Image: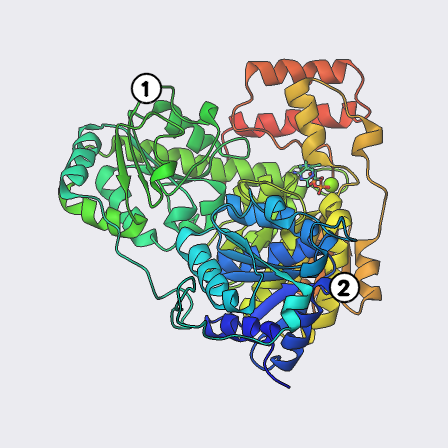
Amino acid sequence: MSETVGDFLVKRLGEWGVNRIYGYPGDGINGIMGALERAKERVKFIQVRHEEMAAFMACAHSKFTGEVGVCLATSGPGAIHLLNGLYDAKMDHQSVVAIVGQQARAALGGSYQQEVDLVSLFKDVAQEYVHMATVPAQIRHLVDRAMRIARVERTVTCIIVPADLQLADAMEEPKHAHGTVHSGRDCACGTHCAHPRVIPAESDLQRAAEVLNAGKKVAMLIGAGTLGAASEVVEVADLLGAGVAKALLGKAALPDDLPFVTGAIGLLGTKPTDEMISDCDTLLMVGTSFPYSEFLPKEGQARAVQIDIDGRMLAIRYPTEVNLIGDSAETLRALVPYLERKKDRAWRATIEKNVAEWWKVLEARAMNEANPINPQRVFWELSPRLPENCILTADSGSVANWYARDLKIRPGMMASLSGNLATMGPGVPYAIAAKFAFPERPVIALVGDGAMQMNGNNCLITISKYWREWSDPRLIVLVLHNNDLNMVTWEERALAGDPKFEDSQTLPDFSYASYAESLGLQGIRLDSPANIVPAWEEALHASRPVVVDAITDPDVPPLPPHITLEQAKAYASALWKGDPNRSGIIRQTFRDMIETFLPHRN
Ligand SMILES: Cc1ncc(C[n+]2csc(CCOP(=O)(O)OP(=O)(O)O)c2C)c(N)n1
Ligand SMILES: [Mg+2]
């Protein structure tokens, strides 16, 4: 059989270094599936349960490896299902190529079955590059350009291939004639090609240094752009006598046990971050687009410098005085010679004192009794037991609070969640992609019961299909089983002043542990605080994937670092209107608030 367009498409992806494609079949991509079968020694097809999960997995592949992630779906419904995962990738600046089928060329424009205008559908999410192939000679440059643009722009691109074209004879090299395109690929080494050094001009570095040297109380805020720049961040923070706060996607950028790391920022942030930001006179933001202005200094309070590899992201959150386009690590390194070491270390000492105090508050909050289990304690006990080099994923929901605050990240670990889209559903798909990329590393997914019912439960089926292929079988899914869409229940209380709307917020009960067992995985039902440590020990030493089904108390409040007056009023009015969980909440909030003000004993 001669080589088809489908064969060549798969071969070319393989030559770019793609060795895994997440997807789901359908008759719009039969010609690509056949090719994948023939090429399965080189490019492995991973079957998901829903195309959205394939897109989440491709996104996570990019997040954890720095390479381009690839997902594949059929025309019409399959393509549509990809969208949410692709937006997750686009908004968190990840490199993903989506390949989708289309009806046969002869049918297009005929309101044919499953005929969707896919170029228009993907025009927003894949705005940097979305094209439909119509003849075999296009395939080479469509693949080359989709891969290259996804990689260098750190974005989502899309190739649409009509079903009949996939079966046509391939044309690897277009004729040398007017109207043909002759593209090339990079070597298959993943991330290492095409990485220019991007450093600001000396004069701009000097202007930045002038602002930073003039400051007496410097704060740093870092994000995902500083992953891989830990030593540079530490050196600059040291010279500037600064504390460092981390936006959520930058959680793994710096270890949490450094005394000047104030932790997360924002609604799920920490008190020492809040104190540092509201008192600082100078702000240095590196590789972050943290969105919430109410958690940044007031305009005029601080002079500010920002560093970002993407010039579009500069000065969009705060009117920064000096804006530097550059790679975080390189730029910080280039800045160091211009920085004067702050002699007065009082500001830094105050930050360190606040940080030390805050860890005691968190511990005390975690140890508060709850009914039956305080979710903070589940995270608090996991933290010191996190295995070396583990990879953490989290879903959207109250879990994100405890992930942000209670887990102490150490060097060598990786961690991510849906940062900018903040969608529910990626926790378990991300974890699966992490296992495929790093089968020898333990992976822990932290997920709410709503997210399990939305996506996670079905992903357990995928885990049961593939886990024997992983050299270290440890994939642990922690479910915070609170029978509630808890994060939103709290938002409705605190932001809108509404009581819990039971019809919308209460979840049907489900046994995640027994379900895991029914799939051949291990299930641990955790319903008493005394069993938290043994449950973690068991899960972390298991010889197959484990679901820890933790029955946690929905009345434990994910308190923002400082409750504002408006939030307190809204919250009081929610309780006044008759929240069904009223008494439990008052008790829990009171306990946690008290912990913030009490002096703590070791
Ligand atoms: C796809 C999607 N739908 C809805 C939301 C809004 N939302 C954010 S968190 C959340 C509740 C999550 O509930 P659960 O997974 O049970 O976690 P919990 O907060 O209870 O810990 C909802 C509905 C969202 N972010 N994404
Ligand atoms: Mg829940």
Q: Please indicate whether residue 275 sits to the left or right of residue 43 in the image.
A: left
Residue at the front extreme, as displayed: 178
Q: Ligand 1 lies in which image quarter?
A: top right
Pick the front one: 511 or 292: 292
Q: Earlier in the sequence, mark 1 or mark 2?
A: 1
Q: Is residue 26 visible?
A: no
Q: Please indicate whether residue 210 sits to the left or right of residue 589 in the image.
A: left
Instruction: Give the x, y percent position of residue 29.
Output: 69, 65
User: On the rendered image, what quadrant is the N terminus found in?
Assistant: bottom right
Circle number at residue 203: none
Q: Is residue 486 visible?
A: yes
Pick the front one: 522 or 534: 522
Q: Report the amino acid beneath label 1.
A: Gln
Q: Report the amino acid beneath label 2.
A: Ile
- Disc 1 marks which residue? 301
Pick the front one: 442 or 308: 308
